[in-house]
Image (cartoon, helix red, strand yellow):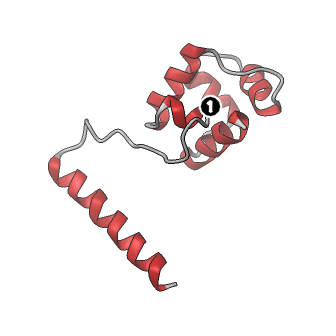
Amino acid sequence: MISDTIRTLRERAGYSQAELAKRLSVTRSSVNAWKSGLSAPTAINIIELDKLFHVSADFILELEQTQQIDLSELTEQEIRIIYELLDYFRQAKGKA
């Protein structure tokens, strides 16, 4: 459910419901309603969520299974480090 995806992203980022609400300029009760499945974020909220968490709207809406990260604001060196970390984790997972 979209509520689970938002909760997971929020928790990974270390945000409380109140902090997420503040960052999105919505009320905490709105975030709580999303979590409870009583309502869903608006299209504008989805766009803000994907910018905040650097994921696609499709990922938030659970239209795709893979998570994408926007690397456009990183330097070539930072991007290389990320790819090296991904390779490290893939290799470590293969050994387990």
Tell me where residue 91 appears, x and y as whole percent.
39, 77
Tell me where residue 89 appears, x and y as whole percent.
41, 70
Relative to 89, say whether 46 is above or below.
Answer: above
Badge 1: residue crowd in 10 Å (few <14, some 14–19, many ≥20): some
Name which residue lies at 50% across and 22% down.
Answer: 48
The amino acid sitting under disc 1 is: Glu
Check disc 1 and report its element: helix, strand or loop: helix
Q: Is residue 57 left or right of residue 90?
A: right
From this viewpoint, which residue is outermost toward the left?
76
Tell me where residue 88 appears, x and y as whole percent.
35, 72
**Location of residue 51 (image quadrant):** top left
Closest to the observer, 95 or 30: 95
Q: Label 1: which residue?
A: 19
Q: Is residue 11 left or right of residue 69?
A: right
**Location of residue 32 (image quadrant):** top right
Name which residue lies at 43% across and 79% down.
Answer: 92
**Location of residue 68 (image quadrant):** top left
Relative to 70, say whether 24 is above or below.
Answer: above
Q: Is residue 68 left or right of residue 22?
A: left
